[in-house]
Amino acid sequence: MTQYLISVLHDSSELATDDEMAAIDVFNEQLQADGHWVFASGLASPGSATVIDARGGEAVFTDGPYLESKEHIIGFWIIEAPHLDLALRLAAQGSKSCNRRVELRPFLGE
Amino acid sequence: MTGLDDVITRVHRAEWARLVATLARRLGDLDLAEETAAEAFAAAVEHWPVDGVPPNPGAWLTTTAYRKAVDRLRREVRRADKHREALMLFDTPDPPGAIEDDRLRLVFTCCHPALAMEARIALTLRMVGGLTVPEIARAFLVQETAMGQRITRAKAKIKAARIPYGVPLREDIPARVTGVLAVLYLIFNEGYLASGPEKEAVRADLTAEAIRLTRLVRALLPADGETAGLLALMLLTEARRAARVAVSGELVNLADQDRGAWDRALIAEGHALVRARLASGQAPGRYQILAAINAVHTDARDVRDTDWSQVVALYDQLLRLDPSPIVRLNRAIAVAELDGPQVALAEVDALPLAGYHAYHATRAELLRRLGRSAQARSAYDQAIELTGNTAERAYLIRRRDQLAGR
């Protein structure tokens, strides 16, 4: 079993609609029923981010997201799947349910 | 020694995909499979002239490649686990049918949708087709180092994303087969209408390779209608290759081609495939319809014998599957023969294809037939500017310059 991160990409500050939330719930329940669920959550808007750099000893806090980009990550799933083809299928269902583009990446390690 | 070179070339064609595919399954590593397969062929070039060609070249190559793989894994202490694994697998006999499945696995892995399209094409030509990196680089007019990197990156992605070495999930199969056929069709088209100013107009090596790979996929998926359709389409297109470029290096369009130069054997094979698909009673997909259109064209001994109403009907059928402007453009060309250039031009003018050379070339021909020379000339100019094919450019320039002076 490999764990995968499914990041949800979004290009505005609008939250999910009721229909999207309902579809996401259905998808989450399916993930849990089929044993693919690890964790999932939405994220607060990029404006809420703080960048921290403590490499120099004293922590330096900087307001705002590290990357200024049009698209940002609005939420994510962590799923478990036996192989990439199934993970791709699940990611496609995730994209459909939340009505946004998603990115799939495996976690490191065997 | 030419006799032996021929033998090695033939064995390479016949055995490469099988060898890489078997090694990849047994070693669990596509990279290692490719390298040891290449080393086994290098060993053949060295040993066969001295020791003679072994009675079973395929088995000789497999054994040699395994030995190379095991030697290499022994040397790499860090990969001790894989070493044990490889040694263990070394003595496992192949299950029946495993070899066919292995090649299919290899094709599906190289054409995996998680890879970029250009990576899929390069990997398929290297791993399944057995073309060398310099050969693939030449075919696509890319620097050898760049092509090498493209293939290395693709293999790294296969490893990092753990793209499975296997036949797709049952519910994914139709989409994945479509993906494989798209790769094969792109390889064929790059050969058939090569782009790039320094390239030959038609790359027979690429069209031949695409046909060979499609034959292989068809042998592996004999029941798939679209695979048969794509093979038929390629054969009926390839059949016209010799007639397609004039001695002057200029493209010859379908109407003006020397039909006596068409390859009758390829046409017969293509027609048989199209007939078999029609007899199946199953609804045809895109490639089967395109093959049927090409069957109508290659059925006519003279362009005037072409059954244009049948061609238009087939394009109508294709439009229901793929309502794209390019299909509409091709349909309009047939409409011009059936209902005249005025009707066709009205249809062409409505298409949003201003960036496509064939759109301007089609408009130019229709305007010319309607006697609207000034507009035809400017359409030829735009087509000439947009085409990437040397022979097509030469043809368009001649057609333009035949128009009366300004």
Image: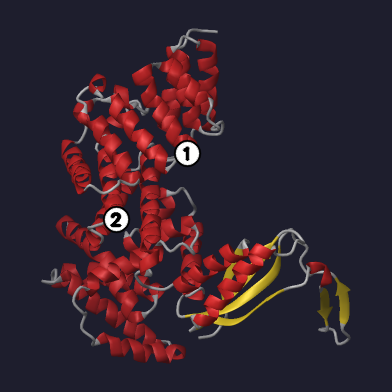
In the image, residue B7 above or below residue B57: above
**B141 sits left or right of B235 in the view:** right
Report x, y in % for residue B1.
Answer: 17, 58
Residue at screen point 34% across, 58% down: B131
Specify the quadrant of the image occupied by residue B339.
top left
Can residue B389 be seen at all in this image of the molecule? no
Residue at screen point 46% across, 30% down: B358
Amino acid residing under circle 1: Ser
**B118 sits left or right of B246 in the view:** right
**A72 sits left or right of B59 in the view:** right
Q: Name the residue under label 1.
A: B324
Considering only order in the chain, which callout, 1 or 2, is on the residue closer to the N terminus? 2
Specify the quadrant of the image occupied by residue B247.
top left
In the image, residue B13 above or below residue B74: above
**B117 sits left or right of B299 in the view:** right
**Residue reaching furthest to the left:** B55
Q: In the image shown, does B135 or B309 lie closer to the viewer?
A: B309
Residue B213 - label: 2
Report x, y in % for residue B272.
Answer: 17, 43
Helix, strand or loop for disc 1: loop
Q: In the image shown, does B266 or A104 lie closer to the viewer?
A: A104
The residue carrying pointer 1 sits among few (fewer than 14), some (14 to 19) or many (20 or more) residues within 10 Å by Cα, namely: few
Report x, y in % for residue B10.
Answer: 20, 59
* Colour scheme shown: secondary structure
Q: In the image shown, does B285 or A18 lie closer to the viewer?
A: A18
The residue carrying pointer 2 sits among few (fewer than 14), some (14 to 19) or many (20 or more) residues within 10 Å by Cα, namely: many
Residue at screen point 30% across, 25% down: B309
Q: Write down the chain letter for disc 2.
A: B
Q: Write down the chain letter for disc 1.
A: B
Residue at screen point 83% across, 68% down: A47
Q: Do callouts 2 and 1 mark residues in contact (Cβ within 8 Å)? A: no
